[in-house]
Amino acid sequence: MIFNSFEFLFLFLPIVFLLYFLLNKWSFPAAKTWLLLSSLFFYGFWNPAYLPLILISLLINFMAGSYLGKDHPDRRRKVVLTFGILFNVLLLGYYKYYDFFVENINVLFGADLVLKNLLLPLAISFYTFQQIAYLVDSYRKETKEYNFLNYGLFVTFFPQLIAGPIVHHSQVMDQFQSLENRRIQSRNIALGAFVFSIGLFKKVVIADTFAAWANQGYAMADSLTFVDSWLTTLAYTFQLYFDFSGYSDMAIGAGLLFNIHLPRNFFSPYKAKSIQDFWRRWHITLSTFLTQYIYIPLGGNRRGKTRTYINIFLIFLISGFWHGAGWTFVVWGILHGVASMINRAWTLSGRKLPGPLAWLLTFSFVHFAWVFFRAPDMQTAFSVIGSMLGLNGVLLPKDLVQTLHLPLGSPVLFNFQLGAPFIEVFLWTAAVMILCLLAKNSIQLRDEFTPKPWIAAAAAIMFVYCALQLQKVSEFLYFNF
């Protein structure tokens, strides 16, 4: 089940909401049980075959975490922690990376190992990291209580289960216990509906519009020319941002309906003026996990300059591989790792670039790197980048030539290939770029929220318009990661 569907908006969400607060008046454990079962139904609605997998993962991690949080000999606790982490990593590795490794072994050694063509279990990348963090914190004695119902809700709470934010136990478990959160709060309903409507608009109106152009462009990567390639790659740059940030907004909004405050995941990343600044704004909960549970345990910046640069490189290499089982994701991670190393060296040198130039370099790098993130293979990525550099011709679209009254001629004339008039695609791209650079983001709007009639009207218009578009429902991009 996905947020931008009739089933979720008009059946699942209202029913779960009403019964949850009705049950809270009778029995809090019953209400939490209902929410847990509803979240598992939400997960299983997509593919029931993998429901047993998440249940087994929940049970084993809860048992391991409960043991780690108690006063057992340190040696035994280390063994249990090691087992727990290996269980999660191997589970993720088998389902997500088995075929990738087999393919590469076959190529390198001329083997003929059979691919399993495993279907990636929904959300496994997210709930694996979330539970690894819980095990480590339990080992450090930073977890407080061990109740399977609370733990199950912490992991499976449906707004954040599928594609994040990656939630830390300290951020939500106490909220599920709060007496104040057991009753309907009108402000949270208004705020949740407002943020959810923004996210829905981002996905249905902006991301899905750019998706059509990005998909068509990448499908004809070999024939793209200069203008086509830039608008194709920009289309994906904006599709990815509004798709994933839209999901995060909807997750935060849906959580607020149940009086649960989920952490922010995006904060205007395309305004960043350095790659470090970008990663403080993009997929914030993933960056936090990688920093707290990989970078710092590796030594962070405490073991000398060389080790610091190695650690920076490693967390971005892991980030790339976490996103997908393919060399394009590995290259994307390597690019960000190298850029982050350069950024650190530049910062330590004490030199600064003018703000506009710093932004341009950062956005350009992020934009180019997204080509590897989107391309189905390395050949396509290099073909698209070659077109962006003008290696496949620098021609102008027919409707631009006619609009500017330029002399017609083969050196400057070609038919635009992205399925819409050039002017339409260009204006959408320019408008969204301005929106990203100048408008307040949804988190700022949430924090400044004051219930007013015009805000309610705006949210209602966005919601109704999006609801009318749901006959062409599309998945979220991060469902694939």
Image: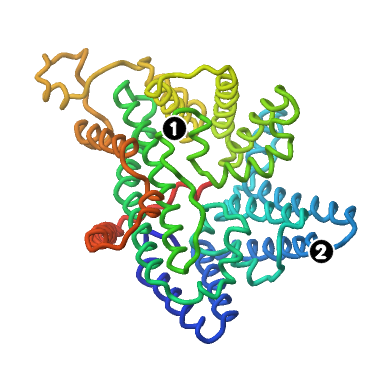
Amino acid type at circle 1 is Ala
Residue at 55%, 29% in the rendered image: 336
As drawn, is 445 to the left or to the right of 415? right
- Mark 2 closeness class: few <14, some 14–19, many ≥20 residues within 10 Å: few
Residue at x 34% of width, y 49% of height: 202
Q: Residue furthest bottom?
A: 26
**Residue at the spot of label 2:** 70
Secondary structure found at label 1? loop
Q: Which residue is mark 1?
A: 272
Compared with 196, 109 (above or below) is above
Residue furthest to the left: 405
Circle 1: is it few (<14), some (14-19), or many (20+) Cα within 10 Å? many
Count how many numbered circles sit on residues in the image.
2
**Quarter of the view holding residue 307:** top right
- For the N terminus, the quadrant is bottom left
Q: Is residue 67 left or right of residue 277?
A: right
Foreground residue among 192 and 385: 192
Q: Position of residue 44 (x, y in %)?
A: 53, 66
Identity, as a three-letter code, of the amino acid under mark 2: Lys
The image shows residue 25, relative to residue 338, as above or below, that is: below
- The image position of residue 339, as x and y in percent, is 55, 24
